[in-house]
Amino acid sequence: MHRRLSFFVALVAGILLQVTVAPELTIWGVKPDFLLAMTVCVALLEGPVNGAFFGFASGFLADIFSTSLLGVTALAKTAMGFLTGTFQSRVISRSVLWPALLCWAASIFHEIIKFLAWKIVGAEGTPPFLFLSVLWLATYNMLLVLAVYPLLKRILPEREEALVMFNR
C-alpha cells in the first residue's frame, strides 16, 4: 500500500474508532483516546515530523467532531507526536512495552497541555483537572497501545530512508 494512503487509512480508522467505539468503552467515566495512542505509535515508527503531522491531523479532526475549543486537541496531539517521535532513534527495542510506557507518559502530558491551553484561553466550562482520572486514562491508553502498535507496524510500510511524508 502506498505510504500516504496508509497514513490516510490509519487516520480515518482512528477518528472512526474515537467517535464510534471509544464512547462505548467508557470505564469509570474515562474513555480511551485511540487517536493519541495511534499518534504515539506513528511517531515511534515514523519519527518526529510525521508524528507531529499525524498528531495535528488527528487532533484537528477530533476538535471538529467535538464541542470543545477548536485547536486545543490539535495542539496537544501535535506536541505529543513530535516529542514521542524524538524517541524513535533513541529506543532500540522491538518490544511493545516501550511504546506502551511512552504512551502512558504522553497521555499525562497531553492532558496537562489541554488543561493549560483551556485555562490560558479562558474557555468557559473547562473540565477540572482530576489527576486520578488522568492516571486512569494514561493506563487505559497504555493498554490500548499493546494492540495498536503491532497493527500499525504491519499497516505502515517499511521506511526506505528518513523522508518527510510530503517531500515529493
Image (cartoon, grey):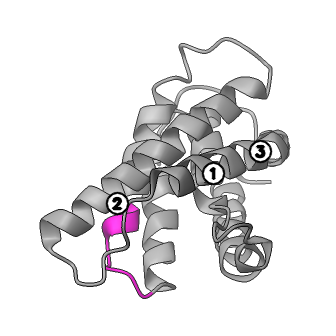
Amino acid beneath label 3: Leu
Q: CA distance from mark 3 to mark 1?
A: 11 Å
Instruction: Give the residue drawn at x 15%, y 74%.
Output: 122
Amino acid beneath label 2: Lys
- Count every numbered label the image shows and give the total: 3
Amino acid beneath label 1: Trp
Q: Which residue in the structure is indicated by mark 1?
A: 136
Tell which of 73 and 55 is nearer to you.
73
> Element type at marker 1?
helix
Q: CA distance from mark 2 to mark 3?
A: 22 Å
Determine which quarter of the picture holds residue 143. top right
Mark with earlier residue (3, 1): 1
Q: For mark 3, does the 10 Å Cα neighbourhood hold few (<14), some (14 to 19), or many (20 or more) residues?
A: some
User: Considering only vertical position in the picture, is 105 above or below 28?
Assistant: above
Q: Are marks 1 and 2 in contact (CB under 8 Å)?
A: no
Looking at the image, can residue 159 be seen? no
Tell which of 92 and 124 is nearer to you.
124
The nearer-to-camera label among 1 and 2 is 1
Mark with earlier residue (2, 3): 2
Q: For mark 1, does the 10 Å Cα neighbourhood hold few (<14), some (14 to 19), or many (20 or more) residues?
A: many
Q: Which residue in the structure is indicated by mark 3?
A: 143
Residue 11, percent across and down?
A: 64, 65
User: Is 68 in the magenta?
Assistant: yes
Q: Which residue in the structure is indicated by mark 2?
A: 114
Secondary structure mostly seen in the magenta stretch: loop
Direction from residue 122 to residue 69 in the image, left or right: right
Determine which quarter of the picture holds residue 42. top right
Direction from residue 81 to residue 99 in the image, left or right: right
